[in-house]
Image (spheres, helix red, strand yellow):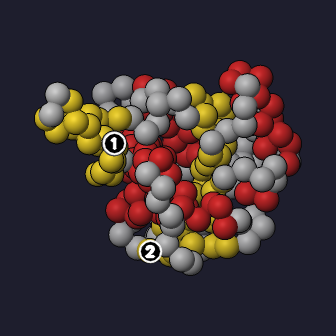
Amino acid sequence: MNKIIISGLAFALLFVGGSLVFAVTNPLEGKVIALDAGHGNGETGAVNKKYGATEADVNWDVVVALESKLTAQGAKVVIAERLSTRRDRVADAVDKCQTLYGRKCDALVSIHHNGNDDPGHDGTLVIYNEKQDIPLAQKLHDALLPLTGIDEGYLHGGYGMTVYKNLVSVITEAYYITNDEKAARYLNDLNADGISNLVIEEADAQVAGLADYFASQSSGGKGRNK
């Protein structure tokens, strides 16, 4: 059996009765994914000065939407409690994965949104710590980049939750909530259910990036050198 990866879908090439058959496999099925909504618990994170939108609120909304979408794809999802220290948040996620699913998570994604004094500044950044995190960082970076079209690349080094428990983990900074255009979209561009379309777009991108990552891992793919 050979596999071809196309936009997060794994197509298995099978020979059945002498005929070549394409079988679509779901790379998210059964994966244990831990999510963290950055800040909260009294921390606002970055704040948009014009509209008052806080990073903590955006982070949480994206995590809630992402959990729903990942679960619909067959993933097993836990959300880290918004505890006062990053170490405690990671420990909470690890404990939940072990208690609910009997093993550690396959990936941990900490959702953040950047801040800058310039209300016109925007860009997409992904943060990682270990070499093992690079493939996940690359897939999420590539999936999220269309949200801004401005590539701020990668940040490497002991930041946030990526330094604990030896998990495959990254921090995503999909865009700047201090950007006035993004804050206005987050607050005012809502779907029929009252959910921000910007949140939905990011959650869809996160799902695509995670699917691409797991599909590439199952096919033996490796990340680009950083």
Depicted 153 relative to depicted 141: above or below: below
**Residue 203 visible, this angle:** yes
- Nearest the viewer among 206 and 49 is 206
Depicted 8 relative to depicted 158: above or below: above
**Other-residue count near label 1 (Cα within 10 Å), few / some / many at <14 / 14–19 / ≥20:** few
- x, y percentage for residue 102? 73, 25
Q: Residue furthest left?
A: 19
- Label at residue 1: 1
At x 49%, y 72%, the residue is: 224
Q: Residue furthest front?
A: 18
- x, y percentage for residue 76? 57, 28
- x, y percentage for residue 35? 63, 40
Q: Callout 1, which amino acid?
A: Met
At x 33%, y 47%, the residue is: 2
Q: Is residue 39 left or right of residue 13?
A: right
Q: Residue furthest top?
A: 100
- Label at residue 151: 2
- x, y percentage for residue 16? 21, 30
Dot 2 and dot 1 residues touching (CB under 8 Å): no
Distance between mark 2 and mark 1 Cα atoms? 37 Å
Corner quadrant of residue 131: bottom right
- Nearest the viewer among 176 and 161 is 161
Q: Is residue 42 left or right of residue 170?
A: right
